[in-house]
């Protein structure tokens, strides 16, 4: 299956949607089409997408800090790039990780997904 993707800069309203609707979140990914393509291909190693077009939302550390009033040791680096894909765009999550961080293709993966039961990291 050929998957195309669109990169959209997330808004504050999008952040609310991500929180309510659950999302796959990847912190520290380079903001480049090559890295987003690598992410899509990596996900395809485990599952499929609902449609043949996926939206990858780009969120800056600065936006996260402003939205959630993160400061000091809790703050993200302002120039940190975070990629988000809504779980509703992924056909069958089929993965089970909890607070997992893994280095692959130059980016850090960090998420918590339980198939059939989603849990947020606080």
Image (tube, rainbow, N blue to C red):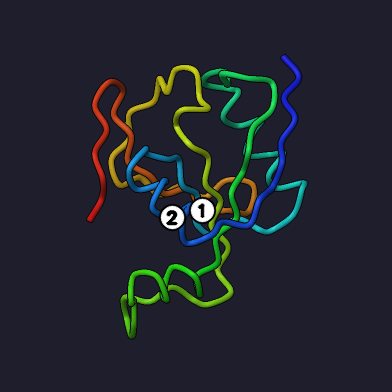
Residue 4: % across, % down: 75, 30
Percent position of residue 76, x then y: 43, 73
Q: Nearer the viewer, mark 2 or mark 1?
A: 2
Seen at 44% across and 17% down, the residue is 92
Marks counted in the figure total 2
Please name the residue that numbered disc 1 is placed on.
108
Above or below residue 4? Residue 116 is above
Q: Quadrant of the C terminus?
A: bottom left
Secondary structure type for disc 2: helix
Q: Quadrant of the N terminus?
A: top right
In three-dimensional space, the C-alpha distance between marks 2 and 1, rounded to whole angstroms, equals 20 Å
Please tell me how crowded label 2 is: few (under 14), some (14-19), or many (20+) other residues with Cα within 10 Å: some
Local SS, label 1: strand
Q: Residue furthest top?
A: 1
**Left or right of residue 71, residue 38 in this image:** right
Dot label at residue 15: 2
Q: Residue at x 30, y 47 (%)?
A: 99
Look at the numbered discs 2 and 1 and tell me whether their residues touch, using CB distance below 8 Å.
Answer: no
Q: Quadrant of residue 23?
A: top left
Q: Nearer the viewer, residue 116 or 12?
A: 12
Residue 115 sits in quarter: top left
Is 33 on the left or on the right of 100, as rendered?
right
Indicate the position of residue 100 as horizontal and vertical percent values.
35, 45
Q: Earlier in the sequence, mark 2 or mark 1?
A: 2
Relative height, residue 72 to residue 35 (above, below): below
User: With 42 as the anchor, is 110 left or right in this view?
Assistant: left
Q: Nearer the viewer, residue 108 or 1?
A: 1
Would you call the spot at circle 1 few (<14 residues within 10 Å), some (14-19), or many (20 or more)? Answer: some
The residue located at (58%, 53%) in the rendering is 107
Give me the disc on residue 96.
none
Which of these two is toward me, 47 or 68? Answer: 68
Outermost bottom residue = 72
């Amino acid at each position: 299956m050929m998957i195309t993707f669109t990169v959209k800069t997330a808004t504050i309203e999008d952040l609310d949607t991500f929180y309510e609707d659950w999302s796959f979140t990847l912190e520290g990914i380079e903001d480049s089409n090559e890295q987003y393509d690598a992410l899509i291909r990596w996900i395809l190693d485990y599952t499929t997408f609902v449609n043949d077009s996926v939206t990858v939302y780009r969120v800056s550390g600065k936006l996260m800090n402003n939205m959630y009033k993160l400061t000091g040791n809790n703050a993200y680096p302002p120039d940190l790039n975070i990629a988000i894909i809504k779980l509703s765009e992924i056909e069958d999550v089929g993965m089970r990780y909890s607070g997992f961080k893994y280095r692959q293709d130059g980016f850090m993966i960090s998420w918590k997904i339980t198939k059939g039961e989603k849990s947020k990291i606080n």
